[in-house]
Amino acid sequence: MRALPVTIALIGSLATARADTPPMAAPPICVPDPDAAPTAPTRDQLTLTKVKYSDLPGWADDKLSEAVPSFLRSCAVIAKLKDTDQMGHDGHGGKVGQWRKACAAAAKLKPGDDAAARKMFETEFVPWSAAGKAGTEGKLTGYNVQSIRASRKKGGKYQIPIYDRPKDLVMVDLSKHIPDAHGRRIWGKLDDKGNVVPYPTRGEIRKGALAGKGLEIMYADDPVDVLFAHIEGSAKAHMDDGSTVWLEFSGKNGRAYRGVGGVLKSMGALQAPGSGTMQGIRKWFVDNPGKFDEVVDQSHSFVFFHESKEPGAVGSQMVVLTPERSMAIDRAYIAQSTPIFVETRAPNVGTPGSSPWRKLLIAQDTGGGILGPVRGDIYWGDTEAAADRGGRMGGAGKYWLLLPKGVTK
């Protein structure tokens, strides 16, 4: 086996990201302005070590035909690119032309034929064990499409606005200006001199910074549901007229993100093991409704949406995500479209505890909190079971990248 080092310098996180305890009184919160000073640059390194498929635990047991439709969606994106285009912001996935053969082979597969799918992946791809500076073990979490109840008109219980992307919001891809930016972006607006300046914070937007601009798509009835929609980056809105509207990410204010679970833990809440889940956070807000804005405003990040034309969650690769076969990754290290075999533990369905979980997923999404060479967020879907498992998932795991033959030497 041979280790291939891929060193990547991260530039600080400039973008957003995702128990049964008795009620407690939350103390006043006094924290430094998270936007006052930029985060110091951190550095990590992705090291790829060539292995055999027999080294992948559970590879022979996975129903690989289930991953093919997800991969083909990524192939549809690849088909629009030039052979000489890079896969990934630094070309760490090789060139587009090196992926053509695998996509063509996948397109010929019959649905449900696991043996043929396994042969295709093993013929077209080489498995590489992924490791960061801390080793091969990283953090794997889960996410889902958040359901919300909403109305086109504000009134009664429908008071929480869902905003469309403002026209003055701009995004700058730093990789076009800084060689080692690795796909990082900044968001803001232009001042009178043409400089990119920070956009209003979550708290400022809540207090009316965007009022009167006609950006409200709809109004929801539960602020916690809207919070989770911001974290997940998508939502399935059940409208008061009986219709269903899918919402997908359209932009963010680019201000500093701070996880709500971390805020609550700093206050002394959610200290019990396993309490820092979506379910635990929701329970705390139910028990302490008057503290919602005070807690949530500690994260200055704010997400904007638009109505999706597709009936399903759409990832940052602009493809519909497949439950348990799509994953969000840090594109500073991994090219979207990359098949990734994952070994971790996942929450049991409807019962406490977790079980070993080993499956092939496709990198098709990103997230503000998904940072690092061995960091992934598994998409679970839009059902109640998906919300349960996605909300409870979070722990250690390993993964292996499948790269076309010839991409790495």
Image: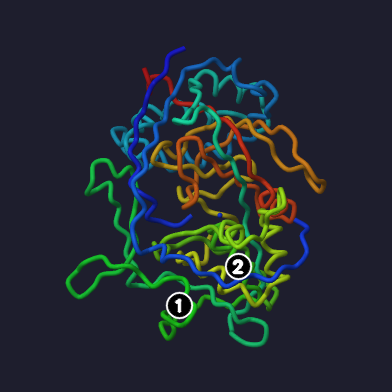
Residue drawn at the location 71% of the way across and 55% of the way down: 383
Q: Quadrant of residue 246?
A: bottom right
| Amino acid type, label 1 | Leu
* Relative to 45, 27 lies left or right: right
Q: Which residue is mark 2?
A: 245
Q: Quadrant of residue 349?
A: top right
Residue placed furthest toward the left: 193
Display colour scheme: rainbow
Q: Quadrant of residue 254?
A: bottom left
Which of the pair 290/224 is nearer the observer?
290
Position of residue 79 measured from the top left corner of the image (x, y, whole percent):
40, 39
Position of residue 317 measured from the top left corner of the image (x, y, whole percent):
45, 47
- 10 Å crowding of disc 2: few (<14), some (14-19), many (20+): some
- 10 Å crowding of disc 1: few (<14), some (14-19), many (20+): some
The first of marks 2 and 1 along the sequence is: 1
Q: Are marks 2 and 1 in contact (CB under 8 Å)?
A: no
Give the total of numbered labels: 2
Q: Which residue is mark 1?
A: 215
Question: SS at mark 2?
Answer: strand
Residue drawn at the location 33% of the way across and 42% of the way down: 182
Q: CA distance from mark 2 to mark 1?
A: 16 Å
Which of the pair 235/66 is nearer the observer?
235
Position of residue 94 measured from the top left corner of the image (x, y, whole percent):
35, 29
| Amino acid type, label 2 | Val
Residue 396: mark:
none
Which of the pair 142/276 is nearer the observer?
276
* Mark closer to the observer (2, 1): 1
Q: Quick one: quadrant of the C terminus?
A: top left
Question: SS at mark 1?
Answer: loop
Position of residue 381 measured from the top left corner of the image (x, y, whole percent):
65, 51
